[in-house]
Image (cartoon, grey):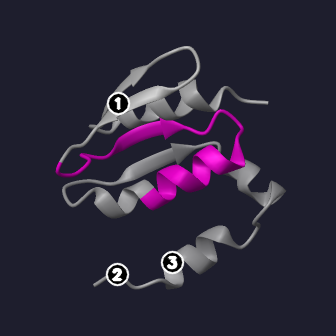
Amino acid sequence: ETDRIHSMSLGLNRIGGRVKELPDCCIIEGVPHLKGGRVESLGDHRTAMSFAIASLSCPEGEILIQGVDCIGTSFPRFFQDFASLRVS
């Protein structure tokens, strides 16, 4: 099992978020948008899908998620379904 507080804090900070990690939670300061970049899923399907959704807030860049094979654990068609969504 992955430490999701750590993986999300680490990843969000890498893509332009402002997150302070605490032992049992994290404090997230709002930002106008994320800048994109490279993040690691750390083998957690929930983390990988969360970063994919966060990519919708990256008007200036993209998020490259390493280790997305883990998504097959719970939602093998996630990226096909996600790509079919239209955001206006």
Report the span colored magenta. 32-53
Amino acid type of the residue tagged 1 in the rendering: Asn
Badge 2 crowding class, 10 Å Cα cut-off, few under 14, some 14 to 19, many 20 or more, is: few
Q: Is 59 on the left-hand or right-hand side of 36?
A: left
- Amino acid on which the number 2 mark rests in the picture: Val
Task: Determine which quarter of the picture holds residue 76.
Answer: bottom right
Q: Residue 1, how many percent across, how many down?
A: 79, 30
At x 82%, y 55%, the residue is 73
Residue toward you, 54 or 84: 54
N-term-proximal mark, 3 vs 1: 1
Name the quarter where the C terminus is drawn: bottom left
What residue sits right under mark 2 in the picture?
A: 87
34 is within the stretch colored magenta: yes
Compute the Cα span from label 3 to label 1.
25 Å
> Circle 3 sits in a helix, a strand or a loop, which is it?
helix
Q: Which residue is mark 1?
A: 13
